[in-house]
Amino acid sequence: MRLVRAEILKLRRRWATYIVLGIVLVLMAVVYLLIGLLARGTSSGTAGLVTGFPAAYGVINQFVFGLGSLLAVAYAAAVAGADWSFGVMRVIIARGESRSRYVLAKAIGLAIILAIGVAIAYAGGMALSAMASGLLGTGIGQPFGDRGLHDLVSSLLLGTFVLLQRAAIGFAVAMVLRSQLAGVVVGIVLYIAEPILSAILFALSVGGNLRQALAPAEVQWYQFLPFSIGDSALAAASTTQETGGIQFTPVPLELALLSVGMYLVVAIGVSMFSLRRAQVAG
Amino acid sequence: MSDQEGTVDVLGGDGMAIVTRDLHRRYGARVALNGLDLNVPRGRVYGFLGPNGSGKTTTLRVLVGLIKPDRGRIAVLGTPFQWGDRRRMFRIGALIESPTFYPYLSGRENLQVFAAAGPPTPRSRVEEVLDAVGMQERARDKVKTYSLGMRQRLGIAGALLSDPELLLLDEPANGLDPAGIVAMRELLRYLTASGKTVVVSSHILTEVQQLADVVGIIDHGRLVREGPMERLLAEGAQVRVRVAPDQVGQALSILTQRAPAQALAPDGQGDGWIVVQVSVDRAADVNRLLASAGVWASVIQPTSDLESVFLSLTATAPSLDPTVGPPQGWGMAPPGDVR
């Protein structure tokens, strides 16, 4: 417990913690402000759909768990790599701390801070959406109606779980590479590269006939890749369906959650194993 | 290291804080430790000396479990060393290489974070060690604003957190101002007076000479000398004589009949310095001997310091690693083994 408390102290004192949260909130504010100001007075109802609940939860999810996941990967890698980059890992090991327990405490501390960040960002997203609705004069809809409450709860629970799993991958990469910068860079590259790889694999599997294959009927194996599998879980979070892009058949929620959980456990396990084996010569 | 190798028979007997036997460690092709045999007595300050790359820091890293020895036996505080036995570290405090911290945390917060790891440490201990190293006033400031000397003091504070029986300090005086060095010396003396053992690895030989009770000198990963400071100084005493360059040969032929002597520049192109391995109270005899033969010394310099001992030992130590060349002296010819 004292290790987790120490981790939380470290994370509270890091500027990166507030910068990551700030980026999500500022981008959401800018987008909602633009929607509120530019779409005001137009006859189109699209803007109202974006800002009115429960549909707005889908948009907030895009920010908090889409952009947020990318930032969480980088943030987790920075946190895990910091001990190596600052040279502090040798102090911790030389004090006789259990290496596995240290990694676990570090991951738990990070998860707590990320969960708090998700809650703040989500609340901010809801407030900004309501503000944009006010500017548009369309009304905020029913954020806490039956459907709205379902979307809110499932988004927060499933989204946070997926975000933590993705962050764990960034965490593991930095722990294995023993570097803050390398962890951040490789984590981001993996996060961006995987959807591109999925798209390429998809194109190859349909022989280039993309027009007829925009909605493949079967679950594809590459939907189970570490960053892609979370999308299936997130798809179940909101009752509002997204449009545009390749619409894969979602992986069944139970299977998606199981896979996300497995990746989470494996990522933490790899981190622990990596540190257990590490010889700190530099 | 296998369990069998880790067993201790004669190692770690009474009165020893650290014993190593035949300790080996390589980094790829480079040999860092080549059969190191250390004997660090309890309750003393042990000066651990050696040239750059001689294996000092590798030894300390092995002792605190940062790296695994390739082979050899170790006993720390009477207990056989076994890789992965992290709890033995609860009795050891260490400052390895340069002190490292989270720069965005204050000094106090860094110590609180370190105290959360390893053995249970009461919160009040952080304040005690901050007091001990004189860092209370700046404890609230972020470490990134600290000078090198302040970081060093905080590093020593970190090493003291668990009130260790054995303290391993790598270059503890690095960056400290004179007052800081004096304060550190007093602190270490206080610790040894209370029964703790302190191992100080350092390049600052004058500091070690003032501080250490026992000295171990390693070169190329192997112990070349170990013993009480007084004995080492007595054995390493020498008299340096400066004569006219064209009289170096004559002076050497006179002196070598009585004691080991070497010219500082063996090719005869030096400025006339000769080193004679005799005790410092024989300086007058050296002068008289030369004068009787018509050789006039312009300077006679009796020396009995750790530096000359260190230089003579590390300059003469054989190269144990065939991939590494012989150690470079500073233009001084090997004056012979003083053991």
Image: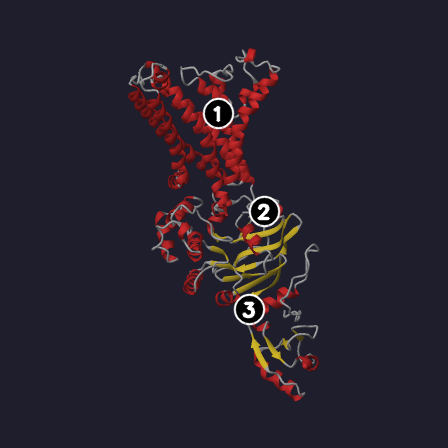
The residue singled out by tag 1 in the image is A261
Q: With respect to residue B294, does A92 lie above or below?
A: above
Instruction: Tell me which amino acid carries mark 1.
Output: Gly
Task: Give x and y (percent) for residue B271.
Answer: 64, 76
Q: Which mark is residue B306?
A: 3
Image location of residue B39, percent across then percent down:
56, 59
Same-chain check, marks 1 and 3: no
Mark closer to the chain start, 2 or 3:
2
Q: Report the quarter where the C terminus of chain B lies.
A: bottom right
Regarding mark 1 in the picture, which secondary structure is present there?
helix
Q: Is residue B247 left or right of residue B164?
A: right
> For the residue carrying disc 1, how many other residues have a C-alpha within 10 Å: few (<14), some (14-19), or many (20+)?
some
Viewer-nearest of discs 2 and 3: 3
Q: Looking at the rendering, which quadrant does residue A47 occupy?
A: top left
Identity, as a three-letter code, of the amino acid under mark 3: Leu
Q: Position of residue B73 (x, y in %)?
A: 60, 51
Mark 2, residue position? B68
Instruction: Identify the residue shown where x is 66% and y is 78%.
Output: B259
Give the chain of mark 2: B
Residue A3 location (% of width, % of height): 41, 40
Q: Nearer the viewer, residue A154 or B304?
A: A154
Eyeballing the image, is B81 above or below B190?
above
Can residue A268 be seen in the rendering of this structure?
no
Residue A184 visible in the snapshot: yes
Could you say whether the residue bearing mark 3 is in a helix, strand or loop? helix
Q: Which mark is residue B235?
A: none
